[in-house]
Amino acid sequence: MLFKELSYKICGLCFKVHNELGRFRNERQYADALERLLKENDLRYEREFDLPTSFEGERVRRNRVDFLVENSVFLDLKAKTVITKDDYFQMQRYLTSANKLLGIIVNFRQKFLAPKRIINNNL
């Protein structure tokens, strides 16, 4: 399993946020709470990490992932009814463009949190 301990810690913090805030907040509120916990747990992170452009002429800062944790794991927070295939494809694009191995999608709107691990198969 890629980044087993780190991803376990990240998911644990997400569960803590979900328990504290519930299901019906917006993404920014979840991100603020998670950022606080990342700091408290001495995890290095970059919030709203800008991905490199993927083709000539693409607008800079067009694609952004919610968090890059320990320069290893992308974390994309959602607050919507259902995670779609498009969300998976988006994470796959993010991983490919930044040459990262692992991304985690967390949908806080669900009654029971179920983080989804996405692996970059192109590396």
Image (tube, rainbow, N blue to C red):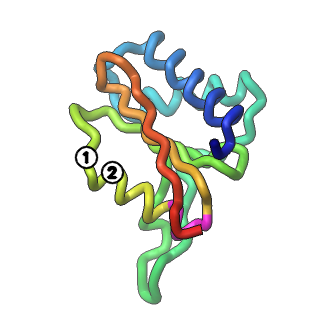
> For the magenta stretch, what is the residue range?
95-99
Q: Percent x, y for residue 84?
A: 25, 46
Task: Tell me the residue that label 1 is attached to.
Answer: 84
Relative to 30, is 88 on the left or the right?
Answer: left
Q: Residue sitting at 46 percent across and 44 percent down?
A: 76
Helix or strand or loop: what does disc 2 sit on? Answer: helix
Amino acid bearing label 1: Thr
Residue at (30% x, 25% y) in the render: 109
Residue at position x 43%, y 38% in the image: 116
Indicate the position of residue 90 as horizontal and vertical percent values. Answer: 37, 58
Residue 6 figure quarter: top right
Is 70 one of the magenta-colored residues?
no
Question: Furthest-left residue in view?
Answer: 81
Majority secondary structure in the magenta region: helix
Pointer 1: residues within 10 angstroms few (<14), some, or many (20+)?
A: few
Residue placed most toward the observer, 8 or 107 = 8
Q: Which numbered dot is residue 87?
A: 2
